[in-house]
Amino acid sequence: MRQLLRAAAALGLSVMLCGTADSKNVGDMAPDFSRADFAGKPVHLTDYRGRLVLLNFWASWCGPCLEEMPRFFDWQRDYGARGLQIIGVSMDDDAAAAKRLLARRPAPYPMVQGDAKLGETFGGVLGLPLTFLIDPQGRIAGRYQGNADLAKMEAQIKRMLPRP
Amino acid sequence: MHARLRNIFCFLIVFCALTAVWGSAVADPRPAASIPSADFIQPAAFAAILGSEAARKPVILQVGFHTLYQQAHIPTAEYAGPAGDGRGLKSLRGRAAQLPKDADIVIYCGCCPWDHCPNVADAYFALHELGFTHVRVLYIPNNFGDDWVEKGYPVIKGS
């Protein structure tokens, strides 16, 4: 019973914290996926249970995606020790374009290749950038689409992470 | 020796200038803001045309990315490919070659916010340069999901 109450409180808090972020999918369990990253290492979403996951759908042709990615690089460095794990999902039709871009500036977190099937499991990736915050229990706590307010996203991340 | 060095120097300057011109022409897509707003068609108006039995239906070309098209596209829309890159533009020109110049064409993308779309303007101007006289662009301010799918307008999925 106590666990149930705790889960309900966590869900309520997650929904409340999403603030002005898009509410679609928020409160749902994040669909699991398993893919090899660009370095060949397996990435399994449920392996990150217990951490706050920022799942970022992006593409090499997407201007706003490339504008926000350096901030994600910084966040992985600044908040990684507190439990943040960023995972990038390239929605390029051709993975080579994303790999070329990342060869010039390697990401400090795993990057996997996405496709329509993976997009559909997240309710459709029908515009980029699209970023989900997934709480340590695996539930979607935030959804940010398009020209996202990164200050708000960072504020939500800080609220959800344990204090240093 | 001096003359040889001068020739090499001149060659390098010309090469760099040509590379810069070519690079900017290929790498920088035209901004969507360069499309005259008179040629926009709004999603609600376009959905009404598609839903009307009496209205003449245009040729619809999706000039964005395949992963987006596979997940959801407007019924009867053909996949032309991302006009912001050379292959997509070639594919669009190939399709356009089969159409009469006065064909009623609606192009759309919706990959990302309008002012960042790398495809619609290149597609629009390519069709104009080919002599098409009735080209309209579906105005998608945010993305195809928010401005079309979530509004309940018709979609299908598949390749």
Image (cartoon, coloured by chain):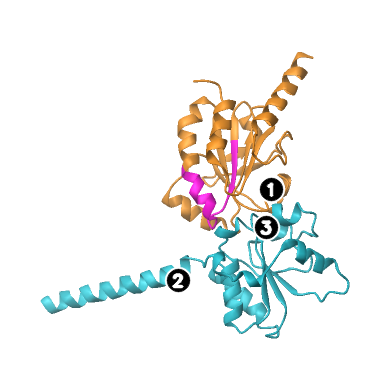
- Label pair 1/2, CB-CB below 8 angstroms: no
Residue bearing mark 1: A118
Can you give x and y, in whole percent of width and height, for residue A63 in the image? 52, 55
Can you give x and y, in whole percent of width and height, for residue A125 in the image? 67, 50
Residue A86, compared with residue B139, is above or below; it is above
Magenta span has A159?
no
Q: Quadrant of residue B86?
A: bottom right
Residue bearing mark 2: B25
Secondary element at tag 2: helix
What residue lies at 72% left-to-right and 40% top-to-bottom? A25
Secondary element at tag 3: helix
Of the two numbered discs 1 and 2 in the rendering, the one whose residue sits closer to the viewer: 2
Q: In which chain is the residue bearing label 2?
A: B
- The amino acid sitting under disc 2 is Ala
Q: Quadrant of the C terminus of chain B?
A: bottom right
- The amino acid sitting under disc 1 is Leu
Magenta span has A56?
yes
Q: Residue furthest left?
A: B1
Chain A drawn in what color?
Answer: orange
Q: Quadrant of the N terminus of chain B?
A: bottom left
Q: Which residues are magenta?
A: A54-70
Secondary element at tag 1: helix
What residue lies at 81% left-to-right and 68% top-to-bottom? B50
Can you give x and y, in whole percent of width and height, for residue A35 in the image? 63, 44
Q: Which mark is residue B68?
A: 3
Of the two numbered discs 3 and 1 in the rendering, the one whose residue sits closer to the viewer: 3
Chain B drawn in what color?
Answer: cyan
